[in-house]
Image (spheres, rainbow, N blue to C red):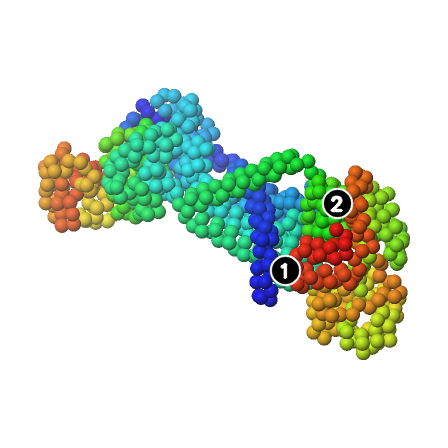
Amino acid sequence: MIKSLWQMLLTEHDQIWATTLVHIKISLIALLIAMVIAIPLAFILKGHKKAAEFTLQVAGIIQTIPSLAVLGLLLPFVGIGTVPAIIALVLYAIMPIFQNTYSGLTEIPENLEEAATAFGLTKWKKLQRLEIPLAMPMVFAGIRIALVMIIGTATLAALIGGGGLGTYIYVGINSNNNTEILMGAILSALLALVFSGILKFISKNNKRLKWGSAVIALCLLIWGGSSLYSHFTTSSTNVAEPKQTITIAGKMGSEPAILINMYKELIEKNDPNTKVVLKPNFGGTTFLFKALQTDKIDIYPEFTGTVLQTLVKTGKKTGNDPNQVYAEARSDLKSQFDMEYLKPMTYQNGYALATTQKFAKDNHLTKMSDLNRVNKKVHAAFDPDFTSLKDGYPGLKDVYKLDFASIKSTESSIRYHAIANNQANVVDGYTTDAEIKKYNLVMLDDDKKFFPPYQGAPLMRAKFAERNPQIVKALNKLAGKITTQEMQAMNYQVNVEHEKPAKVAHEYLVKHGLI
Amino acid sequence: MMIEYKNVSKKYQDHEILKDVSFTVKKGDIFVLVGPSGSGKTTLLKMFNRLIEPTKGKIFLNDKSIKEYNLRKLREKTGYVLQTASLFPNLTVGENITIVLEQEGVSRKERRQKQEQLLKSVDLDPKLYCDRLPNELSGGEQQRVGIVRSLAADPEVILMDEPFSALDPVVRKQLQDLLMNLHEQFNKTVMFVTHDMQEAIRLGNTIGVLHDGVLEQVGKPREILRHPATKFVQQFFTGNRINQKLDLETLLKSELGVDPRFYPKVDTLVRYHVDSVEDLIKDCSNHPDALFIAETEFGNFLIEPKRVWNFFLKWVAGHD
């Protein structure tokens, strides 16, 4: 495990560094905003006990709302990306900063306040010479608490396309890659420790506080200045070259990353005046769909099955014929959301049952209807959803007349380990999972077409498609390409062999003469 | 006339803690308000710099109601010494002393001069103390700083709210000496609150005895001791009266002797060797009008014969 972490550090240090920087940026911006709100508020409410307590209550209530829920609630108002992430983080950080500043101020001994008043010190003088310096240690403690919390919670930003170290965690969870999960978790914990350490060091005494605050202010100024500068310089180069820039995003994991790299290469080769910006691991289905609706992104690859099951409103049960499912998805997207759904690729990324080579050979298993012959020999390990949902095992059981000897419900990330360690001989999975290749498993054919088809295809707004026929043309080159085995192999290259998605995508396009 | 309280009352809800209090304080006096805790003396004091407003009645400074003064100016020009030194812990001793001057925009150099001059006046070496933080000082030292802080802005009036009650007896005595010495030097009008009648008699030119919000008697210490106006005043003073045997060491250290270090011209004074209380009385009758130094086996003391007489008069009165 340590070795694979080290390996990842060596091969991907550029990207890890960039992700860490994004994480720091989100955290610090949120922290600064929370400070700007909470600290003056505490000073204003210092003399108004009731109002201050009310504010504390409200902040406390906000604190108890799960962060995921806050993100969900904010979605319709501010959309996706870093903005809602920062808003959510600010909401969380206000409470500790406000509380500490407030108690720092109210715990200033009564006699000192009285002395200051009795000497005729003005409000400003009191603040400057008594209240701020005395409250400072408490304020700093509050900022530290807030910062540690923000850095931890900021991992959620990855869910809504905000980026940061959470990306590793979610990608890791989605692709059963413990190394990535650990990388994200360890780095965010380290960040929290380092920043909290710096703040602690600074707040030790007055001298450090002065110098430390000055250094921090200077760093922030330089950072802000340089990012502004680069912002202006890049935007000016954009003006110089009349290029169209489009944004393509993808869901979590290696497969969408490979696909959008193919899109990028196809589009840019076809029209050198178009620049494609990629946002891999941008978030879950609804986030991406919202992003597309609100113009934040232009294209993302979506599955036909997912469209029918979660995105469009349809009265019918999802069918089994891939062509019919695609046609239905396409017309519903067009009529309900005014979107264009291009032609799908060959491979299917749906549910599947997989078994070991040996078990398949010994019992002559090739398709799922073979399973009812060996019901009593099957010890299955399924993901909890698959175990309980109607489109999982309970439905499958009826159609194929299954009755396995034992079924273990395990987290999706460990069910492949179960079969590798001979604790199970049948598992559920997705047809293009890299693990199928990694553990040399046999996928059983869904010969009674129980699972709905999941074919990938580029999704965009209809207006965008109308305006950009050359992009549509470029993307349609992929229609009917990429088999399930090919996709599996490419996922294997990225997930297990740690190749860059861009490289894997490029090799495929070259090999099949698409560019 | 300097300060006048006219028919001042204070009510908190239904509870009347000051009832129609009137008195005047002459310029340059040390006016001591004495009374048991809860008698309203601190409330009365804090009305002068308007930390507390009276429910009824008026307070005048130099014949002008204090409400007609700009509040900030009034407070800047009124020294205030609290029960604890209440120095700002984040500021150095020097910065604490001149905090008001800092607000008034006095230059750094002038402030530094003032800090040094004031520290010297309370026997603290500016080189050692000016740049220290308050928590590095003993309680007595802190209160010395607290006292000179009240002098920094050259106020007309200084309010002192039980400034020595938190100190141990030896330090308290030192600071009382110091205060009297400062009073000689700067001649400010002082309003001083205490519950300790010995302190009241020792420091006060005029004493006001407060009980349950009523000013029972105002007068010179001797008058109050000789002719207590009410039963309460009589009980308060006899009850507190030192019934101990007259021991020279205790007397000099706690009541009559002044540390000569606080007096500028010790060298010019007559020195007597004193072995007993009788010696002291004899020397005082020989020198009724001039200060002298009493040399004893436990140290030298500056003696003011008038104060010794006062003391014995009160002592005799207390033993009637």
Nearer-the-camera pick, B2 or A287: A287
**Which residue, as the protein is rendered here, is positioned at the far top?**
B63
Query: Is residue A356 found left or right of A110 in the rendered image?
Result: right
Query: Is residue B218 found left or right of A318 in the rendered image?
Result: left
Residue at numbered disc 1: A180
Say few, some or many: other residues with alpha carbon within 10 Å of mark 1 (under 14 / 14 to 19 / 20 or more): many
Q: Residue at x 71, y 57 (%)?
A: A507
Q: Where is residue A136 in the image (x, y as percent from the top left)?
A: 46, 44
In the rendered image, the quadrant that contains the N terminus of chain B is: top left
Q: Position of residue A472 (x, y in %)?
A: 80, 45
Say few, some or many: other residues with alpha carbon within 10 Å of mark 2 (under 14 / 14 to 19 / 20 or more): some
The image quadrant of residue A473 is top right
Q: Is residue A146 visible?
A: yes
SS state under label 1: helix
SS state under label 2: helix
Q: In this view, does B26 lie above or below A53?
A: above
Q: Can residue A75 be seen in this view?
A: no
